[in-house]
């Protein structure tokens, strides 16, 4: 199992070419001790989400962490995926 840290999550998202430009991220990593995998609550803002349906956005983010989801390093991944305009209107 991979140790899941905020830094790992941030790096994976920023280095993913399909996400294009990531302008904002909020990451909360919970658990991951002897009780099993981590729970991640992730808010990501990217221009890649323009004209992309919500389900496809979530699938894209899930693909980034597919190995960790498969091996149990991550047992829950909560994703809020916004375009820059959507995120701005949420503030």
Image (cartoon, rainbow, N blue to C red):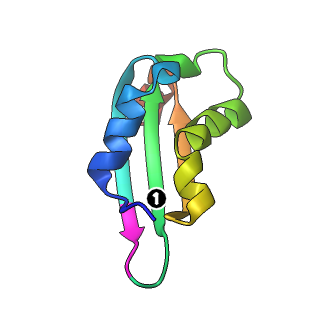
Q: Position of residue 29 (x, y in %)?
A: 37, 62
Question: Residue at 49% of width from left, 78% of height from top?
Answer: 36
Quadrant position of residue 57: top right
Q: Position of residue 90 (x, y in %)?
A: 46, 36
Rendered view: 19 above or below 9: above
Left or right, 62 with reference to 13: right
Inspect the magenta stretch and tell me whether residue 31 lies in it. Answer: yes
Query: Taken as a whole, is the magenta stretch helix, strand or loop?
Result: strand
Rendered view: 19 above or below 5: above
Question: Residue at 53% of width from left, 21% of height from top?
Answer: 18
Which quadrant holds the C terminus? top left
11 or 56: nearer the eye?
A: 11
* Crowding at mark 1 (Cα within 10 Å: few <14, some 14-19, many 20+): many
Rendered view: 59 above or below 7: above
Q: Position of residue 3 (x, y in %)?
A: 36, 62
Is label 1 in a helix, a strand or a loop?
Answer: strand
Question: Residue at 36% of width from left, 29% of height from top?
Answer: 14
Rendered view: 47 above or below 11: above
44 or 39: nearer the eye?
A: 39
Count of numbered circles on the image: 1
Left or right, 19 with reference to 14: right
Instruction: Give the residues in magenta.
Output: 29-33
Q: In the image as oriented, which residue stretches furthest toward the bottom?
A: 35
Residue hosting label 1: 40
Q: Position of residue 47 (x, y in %)?
A: 48, 17
Inspect the magenta stretch and tell me whether residue 70 lies in it. Answer: no
Left or right, 4 with reference to 18: left
């Amino acid at each position: 199992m991979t140790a899941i840290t905020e830094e790992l999550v941030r790096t994976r998202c920023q280095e993913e070419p399909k996400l294009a430009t990531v302008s904002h991220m909020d990451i909360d990593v919970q658990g991951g001790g002897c009780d099993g995998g981590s729970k991640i609550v992730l808010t990501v803002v990217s221009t890649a989400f323009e004209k992309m349906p919500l389900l496809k956005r979530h699938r894209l983010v899930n693909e980034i962490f597919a190995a960790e989801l498969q091996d149990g390093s991550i047992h829950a991944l909560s994703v809020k995926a916004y375009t820059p305009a959507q995120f701005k209107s949420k503030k």
